[in-house]
Image: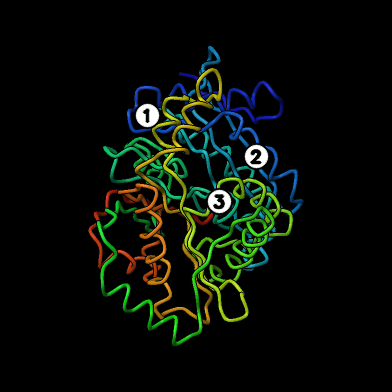
Amino acid sequence: MDIRITEVTGPEQLRRFIEFPYELYKNAKTWVPPLRRDEKKYLTDIPALDPAIRTRMFLAADEKGRILGRIQIIVNENEIRHFDTKMARFNKFDFVDDHRVSRALIRAAEKWLRDQKTEKIIGPFGYSNLDPAGLLIDGFDDTHNAGTIFNLPYAKDHLLENGYQPYLDWTEYEFNVPDETPEKITKFSKIIRDRFGLRTTTFSTKKEKERRSRQILDLINICYPHLPGFVPLSDALKEHYFKKYMPLVHPDYVALVVDASDELIGFGLTIPSYSKALQKANGSLFPLGFYHLWKANRKNDRAEMLLIAIHPDYQLKGITTLIFEQMIRQYHKIGVTKIDSNPQQMENFNVRNLWKDYDFRMNKKRVCFRKYLREE
């Protein structure tokens, strides 16, 4: 079979790039199809907003023009400056189980990167820490979260064959909300509040929601620099993620911790689980996709934990207890009984320790890979 690689340069190629996973994964019962319109915005809007970001997309096809795979490459000058390394990311790497296809895509991507004098490539990673990351290697029988990457089991072997090595492990958890707030959480929360002059809060107006949402983005830039794969959010990206995520921020799904000056020092952000609704929508809002998403937002017994962050000055001081106390109380009010965590880095022990006192199971594992590029 003759594998032909083309770079995405026009609207029709972009459409085929976006459409490919809907064909590849159509029989995978645990896949959660993203909305096509969101995929298009993701691939085109962010590079247009931030001049520090360059991206290239490649398609693999057979001699008849049938699409067999795709890959996106991201070069972020903010990341290069932050780590003082000429590096790049790969993302949206989906392909049929044929090593000739994956090899051809990787070679095309690496050739372009070598032309840019790139020294290292990592992935799968999105543009920033607010985007999905990590290749799924365990947990294929569980429906994946809407905000995570999906792939089939063979993908790992293809990367290993092409010289990519695992360097970052991620885990996901399913957490059962306790019927009552544990007494020790209530007692410990009071001690923490009194000791540090903290309180939990929420918002009730659009203006307050906007203010807290911007504080959340600022806190992410403060809390995450020590984590592998961190990229500082530029002002343009902050504004993009603000517009993207602010509509999802609901007072029943967020826990905010503030100090005596009303400054945000920690938060936990969850959203209703949209996985089942997105499966029914199958990538489109119409004719019934909008209804399924509206229904999931209105009443849902499952939620996805997107982010938890604590200001460095308050880490290892039990602040997460305040967050969990407020979240559990709110989950009881809205009828949420199960929580799915988004991927958490194995090296982030502060977050991993959140689950140790609760009824939970680790249900998925992910890996990010890296490869050092040398002249060929």
Q: How does the figure colour the protein chain or chains?
A: rainbow
Q: CA distance from mark 2 to mark 1?
A: 23 Å
Instruction: Say which residue label 3 marks.
Output: 249
How many other residues sit within 10 Å of disc 2, few (<14), some (14-19) or many (≥20)? some
Name the residue type under label 2.
Arg
Residue extending farthest to the bottom is 195
Residue 236 lies, in percent from the top left, at 73, 54
Residue 252 lies, in percent from the top left, at 47, 53
Who's the residue at 60% across and 35% down the image? 38
Mark in the foreground, 2 or 3: 3
Q: CA distance from mark 2 to mark 3?
A: 32 Å
Image quadrant occupied by the N terminus: top left
How many other residues sit within 10 Å of disc 3, few (<14), some (14-19) or many (≥20)? some
Which label's residue is closer to the chain start, 1 or 3? 1
The label on residue 170 is none
35 or 345: nearer the eye? 35
333 or 94: nearer the eye? 333
Name the residue type under label 3.
Val
Residue 121 lies, in percent from the top left, at 54, 53
Name the residue type under label 1.
Asp
User: Image quarter for residue 223?
Assistant: bottom right
User: Image quarter for residue 99?
Assistant: top left
Left/right of residue 239 with respect to residue 187 in the rendered view: right
Q: Secondary structure at mark 2?
A: strand
Instruction: Say which residue label 2 marks.
Output: 56
Instruction: Say which residue label 1 marks.
Output: 97
Who's the residue at 51% across and 71% down the image? 257
Which label's residue is closer to the chain start, 2 or 1? 2
247 or 136: nearer the eye? 247
